[in-house]
Image (cartoon, grey):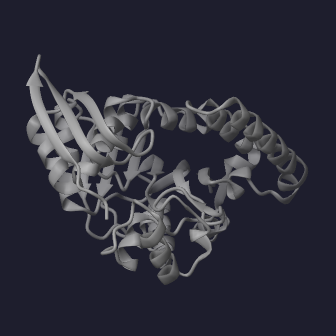
Amino acid sequence: MIDPATVRIEDRDGLRHVTIEGRQFGFGGAVNRSKLTTHYTRELLEMILEAKGAAWLRDEVMRTEDPDYIERPLGRLIERFVSIAGKTVLDFGCGCGASSIALARLGAAEVYGIEPDPAFAEIARRRVAEDGLEGRVHVHHVPDTTRLPLPDGSVDLAVCNAVLEHIPPRHRPAHLREIWRTLRPGGHLIISETPNRLWPKDHHTTGLWWVPYMPLRLARRYAIWRSDRVSPECTVEQLVADGIRGVTYWEIRRALGPGAICLNVVRGDDIAVYARTSLARPGQSRKRRLVKSLVWTMARAVEMLILRRLRIPGTALMPELTLCLCRQEG
């Protein structure tokens, strides 16, 4: 059983100084104690605590306080394929608003954040207001996200940042087609930080090897036994909602049909980009970096010699899917 974390908030010098004691998760991995400083009000922090719990407070706050968490990686990803400056952007599954704020900071003219959870949507609106972005970021609570409150072809860029894995597999095609409907011809869909169902380790929900290949009931039993992220009370349905079932590249292509052009195939540098990010992560030993370097060198050779000829992007076989699909004009 995971011990609950406790939180202490102090107001000092116009900022909130937060101390969290106990097991907690998020950016940089799990820790047992953390301190953070934020410009957000006590009221907003208490809203996040009520909605997500103490174990995830550090994670949620750092999503906007630390630009290396979401803003810079997402910016590098988008700029690899398309410019965001001046664009109208759909942020599908915006959660508590961190990704919508990041998109506005990166230069989007307008951002439409869509969120099915009413508590998360309310937090996102409060967060946007405290960051002074109400004129550019519009958060909508949409209970049924297969029916978006946006006209056909009304956005230049749609972003699914760490969201598709939280949708049950049988419902994903309908959501993807609805997102696609809102894109103008020539518009782009970015999918990022989405666990790849083909990868043997579940980095996202349990941290365990072979879980992606197990039947769900067996995966639940194994996760309760071996993972400190899963409590005995967790149901199969909760695990699916938490993202235990990743997504495949081919699943996305089938949903969108032949009118989707995968720019990853055109660029053909997925593995090189992922390898640079992986090797740059702090806290790795020299031996681990060397092993990783050899693995990614071999993977790069496979990408160049085999995957390119088959028109398969390297990301299709990597731990996370990082995709850009363009809606064909005409």
Residue 111, how many percent across, how many down?
34, 42
Query: How many numbered marks, from 0 up?
Result: 0
Residue drawn at x 43%, y 37% as measured from the top left:
70
Residue 4, how many percent across, how many down?
23, 55
Nearer to me, 233 or 140: 233
Q: Is residue 158 left or right of residue 299?
A: left
Q: Is residue 38 left or right of residue 330?
A: left
Q: Is residue 134 visible?
A: no
Residue 135, how many percent across, how many down?
22, 35
Q: Is residue 38 above or below residue 326?
A: above
Residue drawn at x 84%, y 51% as measured from the top left:
308
Residue drawn at x 44%, y 74% as measured from the top left:
168
Residue 328, how many percent across, how many down?
63, 55
Q: Quadrant of residue 268?
A: top right
Residue drawn at x 66%, y 65% as measured from the top left:
198
Q: Is residue 330 left or right of residue 15?
A: right
Q: Quadrant of residue 46?
A: top left
Q: Is residue 209 left or right of residue 67?
A: right
Q: Is residue 326 above or below residue 284?
A: below
Nearer to me, 72 or 231: 231
Image quarter in which the N terminus is found: bottom left
Q: Is residue 226 visible?
A: yes
Which residue ends up furthest to the right in the rendered image? 305
